[in-house]
Image (cartoon, helix red, strand yellow):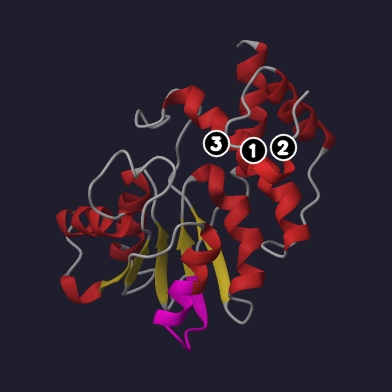
Amino acid sequence: MTPTMRHALCLWEFLGTGSGYLPHSDVLVVCGSYDLRVCDHACDLLHQGVASRLLISGSTGNWTRYLWSDSEAEVFAARARDNGVAEEQLILESRATNFAENIAMSRQLVEGVRRVTLVTKPNSIRRVQQTLPIQWPEVEAAVSAPTIRFPDQVSNQVGVLGLIEEMVGDIHRLLVYPELGYQTRLDIPDEVLEAWQALIDQGFDRHLVASHARRG
């Protein structure tokens, strides 16, 4: 494995820590993305009886605005129907463009629920976990993701290099979003920060938060 891939794997393992679900959740909230395996995983949880409803949230994002003509919520809903999810089990939220909006707008659609499992990409687990206390503080929640191996099972919609760019951006948001009030603070180990900086030095800087860009 090359140094670049070792650094990327370090980020992947850190960002993907903490996957799980709450049995008897009131609803499964699916954060839309470019990876339909997220929807497949949510459908599996639904069929296992983790929850009886699937709330799919997402407008378009950095990748999907060029990928589909419909919103992430609509594309995921079509996939859910193909996976045997009944229409009456589906709730769609088609405006959210980031995790804060995914959570806040989903919260508005299912007021009063107490136990929620959110479903997202593996490299988004940490960001969703840190956003939840800000946007949905009263709910008991877990974050789940499909099991995907890096690098050989990376979505071909973004490829390995695209995913590395995204993960560098994920770490940057974990660093700067707490000071902006978007997420709670998270201690990031030195080895992860060193891997992150090494990838920036190699040019993986396209998904950094523009107002807090750190290069070299």
Which residue, as the protein is rendered here, is positioned at the far right? 190
Which residue is labeled 3 in the image? 166
Q: Residues within 10 Å of mark 2 (few under 14, many from 20)?
A: few
Q: Nearer the viewer, residue 187 or 43?
A: 187
Q: Secondary structure at mark 1?
A: loop
Left or right side of 58 for 171: right
Q: For the point 57% across and 79% down, which residue is it?
A: 139
- Amino acid of disc 2: Ala
Residue 112 within the magenta-colored segment of the rendering: yes
Residue 57: percent from left, percent from top: 38, 63
Q: Residue tagged by mark 1?
A: 208
- Figure quadrant of residue 48: bottom left
For the residues labelled 2 and 1, the Cα–Cα distance comes to 6 Å
Q: Marks 1 and 2: in contact by CB < 8 Å?
A: yes
Q: Residue drawn 65% across and 34% down?
A: 11
Asked if residue 127 lies in the magenta stretch, the reply is no
For disc 2, the marked residue is: 213
Type of amino acid at the residue the image marks with label 1: Leu
Q: Which residues are magenta?
A: 105-116
Residue 22 showing in the rendered view = no
